[in-house]
């Protein structure tokens, strides 16, 4: 062991002149209106009109729709601001935003941690302002906010939260809009889907850890007003998005692609709803060809071959996945309608298309081509034998 | 060589070596030893039954002792040779504890991923026979993300490596509550590998681990296994900073083993030059493989691996034997390539392998009959580890150490008792190396906030915490320090060396198809892959066309040349601080700067110098610890300058060979530097510096040895048969007319000035 080690350290320390000063916590400059719940725990509350919901009935309806994805009462819209994004035990939350729907208003509560030393009390107060048996609505909360807050509970030797439900809107947003808008960050979805533009006082997310670190050093919270605003807006957006997603999932849209995707979202929970949405998506102009394909496959699965056949033919005329579609048609003719001639005709159509694109074939396609060759041989034999 | 009519077995083959032109300097038969059994431990009957089903009905004395101690929750270290059943020493108490209490957990730490895989198979063999589910998983970089959460919650035994523990487990400890709340045993195998930097890092990782365990209320028992080193107990105690029980006597039976030291013939007595040990090694290996004897060849450097591979393959070709029966195996090969070689060795698809010490570790490569060790590997324990690679599974085996013309090898060839009866080396760590220490305090603060007076292992980290707080990495509030930086500290800290980066070697012989063929760690780059250097890979030679020092890429092209390159490094040294002084010896902090200047082209086979070239690379700097000794001022006037300079050159060359022997380190782990007129001390001096930022205690070790180093150097040069100095003893540049005389004279002066004091 090196007993001279501390000498070095002193040398390094003396080089730095900054002093780590303790400050008095009785008053913190620049905090938004609110109150201290404890020495280092600050609370603010704001009330808003129930923007997306004119009446309780509409909310009930949306809850019903989104219950398949984890929505339940009491809904708690939840979002954290943290000291970093890297995860692990070194990142902590300093601002928790909670949104709740009251009879006729939307209440946003924010709990601010003025110093990490008070984290235990902050977490206790947080449990107090979250309703009993909550169901969370978050944006990427399953991966980030919930594991992070639970890590904090464990470190303070408290019980982790286990919400009775958890709707993570990121997953649905990705499904519904990824293709259209690309990046599905909350701010981009807000801008492009909800049409909300934040005020200039908002701060971009990546600056937030640094602003909090500044506050800890200086004790001046005025730099954080943008963070409080950002967090409050996130909660409001979550509520707006909740409604927008529910509407989209119920088919209230004019965009065929969006309706098609809504159909996909329902596929695992309610096949009927999925089919109805695909039908709607294929009846609009321009029709969502993907939706027609899925519909046709679904009819085929249910044994409605005529309906399936007419949809596949419609797709072929639309020049959609010509090879696959022609093969499907050929299969129906061969196996269901027992019409080998017609089946061969369609199989050959598929082959024509293959040959046309031959130079660009991937290995999977080549396998398919081999299969098709076999199919054609078999059909020719059948016809010859007759 | 002629084609072989009759294949010799091992005994016949060893006899046939008598006709070799050189000298068999030593031939020892290590006798077989009977097994010694201990009483069956008081373990769960289900476990006893499962072991009996596997044919384990009795346990060796060292196993029963280890099991009893582990069950009594005493930290312990078992020192075991290869194939003595060390895994049972920990698998039995661990499985027993899980059978007694299903919530009980164990953590196994192996230095490499390959070893973890072998271990998993071993433990599964035992647990399969038991009707209770004991979940064992490896958790490393290859573990699929979707399996990780299950392992975290349900793994009874988690097998991992220090790097994963450091970057993936400890910083996410809240996800591992089940493990940390119930951690009963921590098993650390291959203890002897945790020396130097790696060990110093591990000691700090263990400080972090113990801190987290304490948070969750567990106090695990540590079980270490080690190959023979002289201070296993001290090393284990250094790693966990608690008393550790030591078990050294081995109860396992041993088959007879023949160990031979072969010294190639002297071809120039005046210059002390012997026939090339490389060719001698290649010849013996070729013959062995040709006779169907499974053989492993160890050599010290990567370049030697490639050279030997080339020679052996050529030899086999001449005998009309498939040259692919032999394969290379070293650090620079890609992991996939290495796994394939391991498989082929096990299955017998290849008969011979040429390796650096990468294979020294207990990777299971099946049983080999013969180990050929090209050149003394630098430490006794390393040598015995390599010798142990032959004959792991069954009987009769042999090892041949081929001495190079280096003074140390010659020293051993003339005094084999040093080798057969000598005590193995010390493994040193320095957990409080400033760079390493502060980095782990950082990681630990990320994992759990520190209180002002909280210890970190045996240290008080307050000053480090203050330092980190002043750079805004931590935030001090009340009497505690909280992580405040938006970063993940463990990611930037590599346990394996002080610098994290590797150069990727890219073959651009075919312009449109660049191919990655290997990697070289950054510190070796100036020597190995400077522009125009010849780089060997898998027996083929490549020339470096471009070294991208920013992107850490090295572009090479296939070339057909009959030489290799050897770079010279220009070094400057500056003393910054003196920690300790004792007579003419001192220890302190230094600034080393070095830059490769020229490279020599050395012809294959004959090793003659056939040209040189300039190297243009930037200078690199390093703060480190160094030990120095100087010549008293009173002598300077009486010595002439050229005499002094060739003497110093000789002594510093001898230090390069002798010091690693006592410090149990690789030659590359230290740097020796000398100055005829030292600007700091104003007297001729020689420095032995740690080749690692901050130092890992090698210089401290050299300082503690002092006169012993001088004595060993004297002994080495007296034993060298050359007349006026040779590349082996006084170094290539020192081989002038009176180099040997000057060196000996200087050593005598240094030795007597010690005596005067």
Image (tube, coloured by chain):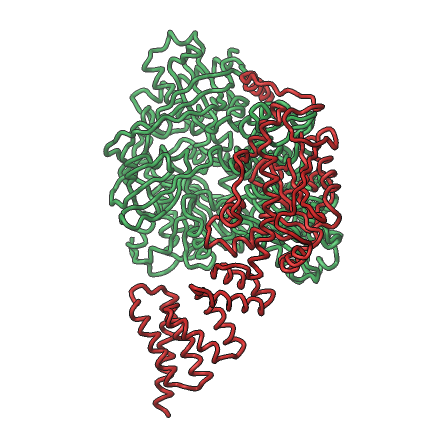
Residue A346, image x and y in percent? Answer: 36, 78
| Front residue of A154 and B268 | A154
Q: Residue furthest bottom?
A: A386
Residue B50, image x and y in percent? Answer: 68, 60
| Image quarter of residue B134 | bottom right
**Disc count in the image?**
0
Residue A60's place in the image compared with A102, above or below, is below
Residue A340 visible at all: yes
Residue B78, image x and y in percent? Answer: 63, 43
Residue A28's place in the image compared with A191, above or below, is above
User: In the image, is B660 to the left or to the right of B529?
Assistant: right
Residue at left offset 47%, top offset 80%: A306
| Front residue of A71 and B603 | A71
Residue A189, image x and y in percent? Answer: 52, 48
| Front residue of B332 and B260 | B332
| Front residue of B533 and B173 | B173
What colour is chain B?
green
Residue B205 visible at all: no
Tell me the red chain. A
Residue at left offset 70%, top offset 32%: A34
User: In the image, is B356 to the left or to the right of B267?
Assistant: right
User: In the image, is A364 to the left or to the right of A10?
Assistant: left
| Image quarter of residue A230 | top right
């Amino acid at each position: 062991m090196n007993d001279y080690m501390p000498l070095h350290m002193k040398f390094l320390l003396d080089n730095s002149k900054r002093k780590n000063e303790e400050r008095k916590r009785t008053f913190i400059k620049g905090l938004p209106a609110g109150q201290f719940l404890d020495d280092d725990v600050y609370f603010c509350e704001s009330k808003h009109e129930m923007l997306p919901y004119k009446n309780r009935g509409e909310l009930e309806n949306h809850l019903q729709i989104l219950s398949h994805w984890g929505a339940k009462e009491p809904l708690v819209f939840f979002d954290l601001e943290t000291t970093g994004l890297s995860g692990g035990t070194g990142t902590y939350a300093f601002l928790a935003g909670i949104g709740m729907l009251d009879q006729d208003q939307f209440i946003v509560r924010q709990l601010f941690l003025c110093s990490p030393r008070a984290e235990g009390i902050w977490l206790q107060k947080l449990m107090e302002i979250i309703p009993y048996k909550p169901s969370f609505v978050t944006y990427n909360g399953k991966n980030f906010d919930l594991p992070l807050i639970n890590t904090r509970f464990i470190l303070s030797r408290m019980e982790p939260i286990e919400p009775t439900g958890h709707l993570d809107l990121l997953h649905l947003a990705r499904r519904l809009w990824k293709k259209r808008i690309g990046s599905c960050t909350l701010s981009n979805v807000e801008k492009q889907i909800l049409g909300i533009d934040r005020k200039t006082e908002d701060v971009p997310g990546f600056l937030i850890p640094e602003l909090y670190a500044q506050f800890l050093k200086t004790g001046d919270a005025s730099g954080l007003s943008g963070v409080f605003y950002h967090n409050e807006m996130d909660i409001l957006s979550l509520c707006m998005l909740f409604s927008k997603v529910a509407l989209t999932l119920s088919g209230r849209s004019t965009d065929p692609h969006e309706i098609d995707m809504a159909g996909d979202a329902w596929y695992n929970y309610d096949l009927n709803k999925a089919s109805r949405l695909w039908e709607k998506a294929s009846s609009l102009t321009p029709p969502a060809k993907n939706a027609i394909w899925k519909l046709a496959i679904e009819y085929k699965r249910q044994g409605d071959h005529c309906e399936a056949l007419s949809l596949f033919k419609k797709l072929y005329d639309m020049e959609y996945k010509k090879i696959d579609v022609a093969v499907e048609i050929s299969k129906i003719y061969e196996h269901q309608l027992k019409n080998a001639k017609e089946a061969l005709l369609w199989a050959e159509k598929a082959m024509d298309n293959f040959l046309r694109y031959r130079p660009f074939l991937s290995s999977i396609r080549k396998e398919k081509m081999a299969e098709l060759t076999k199919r054609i041989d078999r059909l020719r034999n059948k016809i010859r034998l007759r | 060589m002629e084609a072989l009519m009759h294949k010799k077995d091992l005994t016949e083959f060893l006899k046939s070596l008598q006709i070799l032109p050189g000298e068999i300097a030593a031939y020892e038969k290590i006798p077989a030893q009977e097994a010694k059994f201990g009483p069956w431990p008081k373990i769960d009957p289900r476990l006893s039954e499962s072991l009996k089903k596997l044919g384990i009905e009795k346990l060796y004395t060292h196993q029963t002792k280890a099991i009893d101690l582990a069950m009594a929750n005493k930290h312990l270290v078992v020192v075991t040779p290869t194939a003595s059943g060390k895994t049972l020493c920990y698998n039995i108490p661990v499985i027993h504890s899980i059978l007694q209490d299903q919530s009980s957990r164990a953590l196994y730490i192996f230095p490499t991923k390959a070893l973890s895989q072998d271990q998993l198979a071993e433990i599964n063999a035992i647990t399969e026979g038991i009707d209770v589910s004991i979940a064992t998983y490896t958790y490393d970089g290859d573990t699929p993300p979707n399996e990780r959460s299950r392992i975290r919650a349900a793994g009874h035994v988690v097998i991992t490596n220090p790097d994963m523990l450091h970057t993936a487990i400890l910083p996410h400890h809240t996800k591992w509550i089940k493990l940390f709340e119930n951690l009963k045993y921590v098993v650390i195998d291959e203890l002897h590998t945790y020396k130097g930097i790696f060990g110093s890092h591990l000691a700090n990782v263990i400080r972090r681990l113990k801190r987290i365990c304490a948070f969750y209320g567990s106090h695990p028992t540590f079980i270490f296994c080690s190959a023979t080193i002289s201070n296993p107990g001290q090393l284990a105690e250094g790693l966990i900073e608690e008393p550790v029980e030591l078990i050294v006597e081995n109860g396992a039976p041993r088959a007879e083993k023949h160990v031979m030291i072969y010294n190639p013939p002297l071809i120039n007595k005046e210059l002390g030059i012997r026939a090339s040990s490389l060719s001698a090694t290649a010849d013996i290996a070729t013959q062995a493989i040709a006779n169907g004897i499974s053989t492993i060849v160890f050599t010290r450097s990567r370049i030697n691996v490639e050279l030997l591979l080339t020679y052996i393959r050529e030899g086999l070709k001449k005998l009309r034997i498939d040259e692919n029966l032999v394969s290379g195996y070293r650090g620079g090969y890609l992991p996939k390539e290495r796994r394939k070689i391991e498989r082929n060795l096990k299955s017998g698809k290849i008969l011979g392998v040429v390796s650096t010490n990468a294979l020294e570790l207990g990777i299971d490569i099946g049983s080999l009959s013969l180990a050929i060790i090209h050149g003394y590997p630098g430490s006794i324990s390393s040598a015995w580890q390599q010798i142990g690679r032959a004959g792991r599974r069954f009987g009769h085996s042999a090892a041949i150490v081929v001495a190079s013309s280096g003074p140390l090898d010659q020293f051993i060839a003339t005094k084999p008792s040093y080798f057969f009866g000598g005590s193995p080396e010390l493994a040193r760590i320095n957990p409080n190396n400033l760079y390493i220490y502060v980095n782990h305090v950082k990681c630990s603060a990320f994992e759990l906030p520190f209180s002002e007076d909280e210890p970190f292992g045996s240290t008080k980290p307050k000053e480090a915490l203050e330092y980190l707080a002043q750079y805004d990495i931590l935030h001090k509030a009340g009497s505690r320090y909280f992580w405040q930086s938006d970063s993940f500290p463990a990611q930037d800290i590599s346990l394996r060396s002080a610098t994290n980066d590797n150069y990727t070697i890219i073959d651009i012989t075919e312009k449109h198809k660049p191919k990655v063929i290997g990697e070289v760690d950054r510190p070796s780059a100036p020597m190995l892959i400077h522009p125009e250097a010849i780089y060997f890979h898998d027996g083929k030679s490549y020339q470096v066309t471009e070294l991208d020092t920013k992107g850490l890429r090295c572009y090479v092209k296939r070339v057909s040349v009959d030489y290799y390159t050897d770079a010279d490094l220009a070094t400057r040294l500056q003393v910054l601080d003196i920690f300790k002084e004792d007579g003419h010896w001192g220890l302190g902090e230094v600034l080393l700067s070095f830059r490769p200047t020229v490279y020599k082209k050395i012809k294959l086979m004959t090793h003659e110098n056939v040209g040189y070239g300039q190297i243009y690379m930037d200078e690199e700097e390093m703060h480190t610890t160094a030990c120095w000794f100087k010549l008293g001022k009173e002598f300077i006037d009486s010595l002439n300058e050229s005499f002094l300079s060739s003497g110093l050159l000789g002594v510093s060359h001898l230090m390069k060979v002798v010091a690693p022997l006592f410090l149990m380190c690789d030659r590359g782990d230290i740097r020796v530097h000398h100055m005829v007129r030292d600007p700091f001390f104003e007297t001729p001096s020689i420095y032995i510096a740690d080749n690692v930022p901050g130092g890992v205690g090698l210089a401290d070790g050299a300082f503690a040895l002092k006169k012993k180093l001088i004595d060993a150097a004297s002994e080495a040069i007296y034993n060298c048969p050359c007349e006026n100095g040779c590349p082996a003893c006084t170094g290539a540049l020192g081989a002038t007319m009176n180099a040997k005389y000057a060196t000996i004279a200087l050593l005598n002066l240094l030795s007597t000035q010690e005596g005067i004091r």
